[in-house]
Amino acid sequence: EMSPNGLSSAALQLGEDPPVWEDAQEFLIAACDELKPTDLIHHPNFSYFEAMSAVALMEPKMDAGMLREGCESKSVEDLVSEGRAPLALSPSQLQQVAQQLLACEATWHAGHSLAQTVF
């Protein structure tokens, strides 16, 4: 829950100071003349990994699993009834599923985003 000044109720309870906002428009306009196409203005704590791992679920631009217009989302029950998500798997199919799950987990252990690997 947010208060009128933009702080969460948890931040207010912790006694945190309200954020200080400064107008950066003039700086950014001036910087535009100096920037090359590959340059980036960012905070010193900026991390490409964190930026690429930030996933807004159900946001079409951020969620790789989000369905687009014209594609309908189906429930698990619908997929099972259509035979697209069978419950009875052969030993070979079970092995393939297990290998894919292990590959996803290994990718996560290698440092990739949990939301984009295991889940």
Image: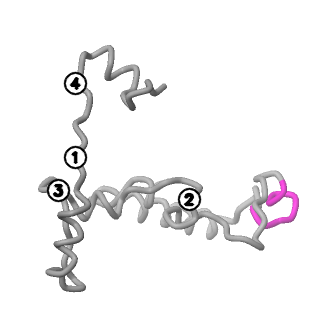
> Label 4 belongs to which residue?
17
Query: Relative to residue 10, is residue 102 depicted above or below?
Result: below
At label 2, counting other C-alpha atoms closer than 10 Å, the crowd grade (few under 14, some 14-19, many 20 or more) is few
User: Which residue type carries mark 2?
Assistant: Glu
What whole-number distance in Å separates the C-alpha atoms at marks 3 and 4?
Answer: 20 Å
Label 1 sits on a secondary structure element that is loop
Residue at x 17% of width, y 72% of height: 30
> Label 2 belongs to which residue?
59
Frontmost residue, 118 versus 66: 66
Label 4 sits on a secondary structure element that is loop
User: Which residue type carries mark 1?
Assistant: Glu
What whole-number distance in Å separates the C-alpha atoms at marks 3 and 1?
Answer: 14 Å
> Label 1 belongs to which residue?
22
Residue at x 34% of width, y 64% of height: 52
What whole-number distance in Å separates the C-alpha atoms at marks 2 and 3?
Answer: 24 Å
Residue at x 71% of width, y 62% of height: 89
Extreme residue toward the right, this view? 81
> Label 3 belongs to which residue?
43
At label 3, counting other C-alpha atoms closer than 10 Å, the crowd grade (few under 14, some 14-19, many 20 or more) is few
Question: Which is more foreground, mark 3 or mark 1?
Answer: 1
Residue 95, x across and y down, in percent = 55, 65
- Which residues fall within the magenta stretch? 78-85
Residue 57, x across and y down, in percent = 54, 53
Answer with mark 2 or mark 3, whichever residue precedes in sequence.
Answer: 3
Question: Which is more foreground, mark 1 or mark 4?
Answer: 1
Label 2 sits on a secondary structure element that is loop
Assess whether mark 4 and mark 1 are in contact (beta carbons under 8 angstroms): no
Residue at x 81% of width, y 57% of height: 80
User: Which residue type carries mark 3?
Assistant: His
Q: Is residue 84 magenta?
A: yes
Q: Is residue 98 left or right of residue 13?
A: right
